């Protein structure tokens, strides 16, 4: 056309959002550096309310932007402080976090490089590294050389993804096709298992736990008593219950599972990290028979959120169930070599962050001995804390810990009193410890995970229960 200039190498409409900004980079990197250098990380949580937070955020998002220094300042002063730092060694609630310094830094590399690891075609380098980390977990569990899977966002999605495979695989294999399949679970199975069963249209066959553990004999008895036992397609065992850190009778359950042709899923989201600890390794005997295993590195394997390892004994079974087919995706599978690996084929996801890389980098930098020492250190703190509880005249140890969860009874306290104490403890920045229920009774639950939690910190908590 007359008057039109020839194509140039410049963007048609340049936009500063896509231009390197040294000052902005310095600003954010300095914040990250400061955060990484905190030792110990403070608990925080300054009693913010919806109202106070809304006031801070009011008008921030609008047609024109803000000075990044001011936005970061608002975040640092008023938002970050309204989040309890789960990587503080004083955070002992729920499941804490303790990501290694190398893993946190490499997470920035993953972000700054926009690393995704969805298919081999796009991201072979990232997938190969993730698979090296998965292989290490598979070896610890004793899975055969063909085992594999992918990293997903958490134990919940991992449980769901594995149970979909259990539902769609075990049925035809055993020559049965129940309309409403059942999956055997225990009373102590994680809440996400019940959610997953509901999503996939399966019902739980709740096997009564024996001393809070699922055992082979209880599973066998339940299957015998179940009139529709041909409809049972799988069993979920827990290696490290979230409430009390107990490991099911994996060996016994695996034997019954094989006898009945059930898919054997092991939920080791929290406890699987203890495979690194030779002192407790024998509690996990039988895990090598699993058809699928979940281990969350974002819990006790010191990786940043969100990172859960999902492994299958025979990955081809999972691929047959999970691989997505679409016109625009055909190229992914078209010229596939036999050993090409698409993480998207092994769970209920497609696009995924290369979330296993931070773990991989950290393992490569520090070596597995450092991981073993860190996990053993946590087990040691938990044992020592249990001894302190046992010796405290005003407290009772509910049971000796199997792994790193310690349940503490304060005779004379009701739920209300435990809750008031928990809030006060957080307000004083002594610790974040929340109550749980054990055999119908409220008790305090201390979940140890940070290798740098000290016995002095524990003693302060116990003293506050006097
Ligand atoms: C934490 C946990 C889950 C859920 O994992 P998320 O990563 O929180 O989704 C599942 N099972 C067990 C045993 C857990 O401890």
Image (cartoon, rainbow, N blue to C red):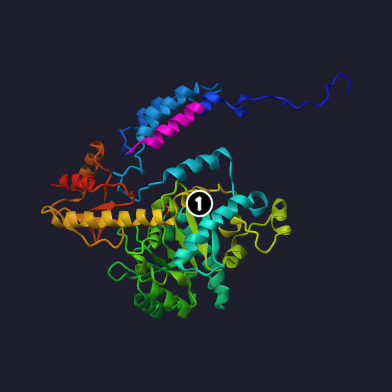
Q: Looking at the picture, how far across and down is residue 52, in whole percent?
A: 35, 28
Residue hosting label 1:
360
Whether residue 160 appears in this view of the structure is no
Q: Secondary structure at mark 1?
A: helix
User: In which quadrant is the N terminus drawn?
Assistant: top right
Main secondary structure type of the part rendered in magenta: helix
Q: Is residue 105 magenta?
A: no
Is 178 situated left or right of 192 in this image? right
Whether residue 84 appears in this view of the structure is yes
Residue drawn at the location 40% of the way across and 29% of the way down: 76
Outermost residue toward the top in this view = 3
Q: Nearer the viewer, residue 446 or 189?
A: 446
Occupied quadrant, residue 376: bottom left
Occupied quadrant, residue 249: bottom left
Q: Residues within 10 Å of mark 1 (few under 14, many from 20)?
A: many
Outermost residue toward the right in this view = 2
Residue drawn at the location 51% of the way across and 53% of the way down: 152
Residue drawn at the location 71% of the way across and 50% of the way down: 328
What are the residue bounds of the magenta stretch? 26-39
In the image, is residue 321 above or below residue 374? below
Q: Looking at the picture, how far across and down is residue 163, in whole percent?
A: 50, 64
Q: Looking at the picture, how far across and down is residue 213, in whole percent?
A: 32, 68
In the image, is residue 245 above or below residue 231? above
Query: Where in the image, quadrant-wise, is ligand 1 located?
Result: bottom left
Q: Nearer the viewer, residue 44 or 60?
A: 44
Q: Looking at the picture, how far across and down is residue 312, in whole percent?
A: 53, 65
Outermost residue toward the left in this view = 393
Q: Nearer the viewer, residue 13 or 324?
A: 13
Q: Is mark 1 within 8 Å of ligand 1?
A: no
């Amino acid at each position: 056309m007359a008057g039109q200039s020839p194509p140039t190498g410049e963007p048609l409409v340049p936009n500063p959002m896509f231009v390197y900004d040294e000052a902005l980079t310095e600003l954010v990197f300095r914040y990250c550096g400061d955060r990484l250098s905190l030792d110990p990380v403070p608990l925080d949580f300054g009693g913010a309310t919806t109202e106070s937070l809304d006031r801070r955020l009011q008008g921030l998002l609008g047609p024109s932007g803000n000075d990044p220094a001011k936005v970061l300042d608002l975040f640092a002063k008023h938002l970050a402080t309204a989040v309890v730092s789960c990587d503080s060694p004083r955070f002992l609630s729920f499941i804490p976090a303790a990501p290694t310094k190398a893993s946190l830094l490499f997470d920035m590399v993953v972000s700054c490089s926009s690393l995704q690891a969805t298919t081999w075609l796009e991201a072979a380098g990232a997938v190969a590294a993730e698979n090296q980390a998965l292989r290490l977990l598979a070896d610890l569990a004793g899975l055969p050389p063909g085992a594999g899977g992918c990293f997903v966002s958490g134990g919940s999605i991992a449980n769901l993804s594995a149970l979909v495979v259990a539902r769609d695989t075990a049925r035809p294999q055993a020559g049965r096709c129940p309309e409403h399949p059942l999956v055997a679970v225990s009373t102590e199975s994680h809440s996400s298992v019940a959610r997953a069963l509901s999503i996939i249209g399966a019902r739980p066959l709740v096997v009564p736990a024996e001393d809070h553990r699922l055992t082979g004999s209880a599973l066998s008895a339940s299957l015998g008593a179940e009139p529709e036992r041909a409809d049972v397609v799988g069993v979920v065992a827990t290696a490290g219950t979230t409430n009390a850190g107990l490991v099911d009778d994996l060996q016994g359950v695996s034997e019954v599972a094989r006898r009945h042709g059930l898919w054997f899923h092991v939920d080791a989201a929290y406890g699987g990290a203890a495979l690194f600890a030779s002192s407790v390794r024998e509690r996990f005997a039988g895990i090598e028979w699993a058809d699928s295993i979940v281990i969350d590195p974002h819990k006790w394997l010191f990786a940043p959120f969100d990172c859960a390892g999902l492994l299958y004994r025979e990955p081809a079974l999972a691929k047959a169930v999970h691989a997505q087919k679409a016109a625009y995706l055909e190229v992914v599978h078209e010229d596939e070599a036999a050993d090409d690996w698409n993480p998207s084929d092994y769970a209920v996801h497609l696009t995924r962050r290369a979330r296993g890389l931070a773990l991989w980098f950290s393992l490569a930098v520090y070596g597995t001995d450092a991981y073993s020492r860190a996990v053993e250190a946590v087990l040691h703190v938990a044992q020592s804390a249990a001894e302190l509880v046992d010796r405290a005249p005003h407290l009772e140890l509910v049971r000796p810990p199997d792994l790193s969860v310690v349940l503490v009874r304060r005779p004379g306290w009701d739920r209300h009193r435990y809750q008031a104490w928990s809030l006060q403890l957080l307000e004083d920045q002594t610790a974040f410890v929340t109550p749980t229920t054990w055999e119908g009774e409220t008790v305090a639950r201390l979940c140890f995970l940070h290798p740098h939690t000290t016995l002095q910190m524990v003693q302060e908590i116990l003293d506050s229960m006097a």
